[in-house]
Image (cartoon, helix red, strand yellow):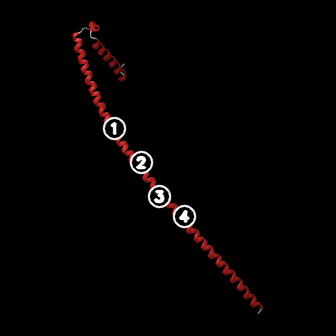
Amino acid sequence: LNMSSRQDQERRDWRKQLDEAQTALEKAEETCTKRLQAMAEDHKKHLQVLTSKHKRSLSKAKTQLQEKQGKYKDLAKHVAQLQSEKAVAVRVCEENKRFFELRLAEHATYTSPRRRRDVSPEMRDLAERHDEHERQLRMLCGDT
């Protein structure tokens, strides 16, 4: 009987230890599950924040791209307009130059080179400016 009661006592102790271990295991599993759930929620929140930031960044970049495309389009129009205006200005200058050269040639036929100093001051001034402009044009074009 002594042996049997000792075995019964051991069984009760083992059962108690087993129950305690089972309880500790359940608590550990419960704690682990709670921690995993908390981590999953934190991860989900973090992912939402990142997604939100990503969407805002994309939206901002898209807006900036549209603004820059608009600016580039305006600049291209302005460049085309300036090129057109330049072409008109060059044409007008060429026409003025031809007209001036004709007038100068007409005047030269009426006046000999020796009498150039006798020409009116306005015509002499025009001729000198023409010579100066011609020299500057040659320098700009590389014809020295």
Secondary structure beneath dot 3 equals helix
Q: Residue at x 45, y 54 (%)?
A: 56
Q: How much space separates mark 2 and mark 4, taking CA atoms?
A: 33 Å
Q: Which residue is mark 4?
A: 42
Is residue 52 shown left or right of residue 21? left
Q: Amino acid at mark 1?
A: His
Q: Amino acid at mark 3?
A: Ser
Residue located 27% across and 21% down the image: 97
- Looking at marks 4 and 3 on the same chain, the residue that comes earlier in the sequence is marked by 4
Q: CA distance from mark 1 to mark 4?
A: 53 Å
- Crowding at dot 1, Cα within 10 Å, few <14 / some 14-19 / many 20+, comes out as few
Q: Which residue is at the far bottom?
A: 1
Q: Nearer the viewer, residue 17 or 133?
A: 133
Q: Position of residue 37 (x, y in %)?
A: 55, 69
Residue occupying the far top of the picture: 114
User: For mark 1, what is the residue?
Assistant: 78
| Upstream in sequence: badge 2 or badge 1 | 2
Relative side of 132 to 111, left or right: right
Give the amino acid type for the residue marked by disc 2 in the picture. Gln
Q: Earlier in the sequence, mark 2 or mark 4?
A: 4
Callout 1 secondary element: helix
Which residue has dot 3 on it?
52
For the residue labelled by badge 4, is the local secondary structure a helix, a strand or a loop? helix
Name the residue tied to disc 2: 64
Q: From mark 2 to mark 1, how far is it between C-alphas?
A: 21 Å
Task: Tell me the tag on residue 97.
Answer: none
- State the image quarter where residue 110 is shown: top left
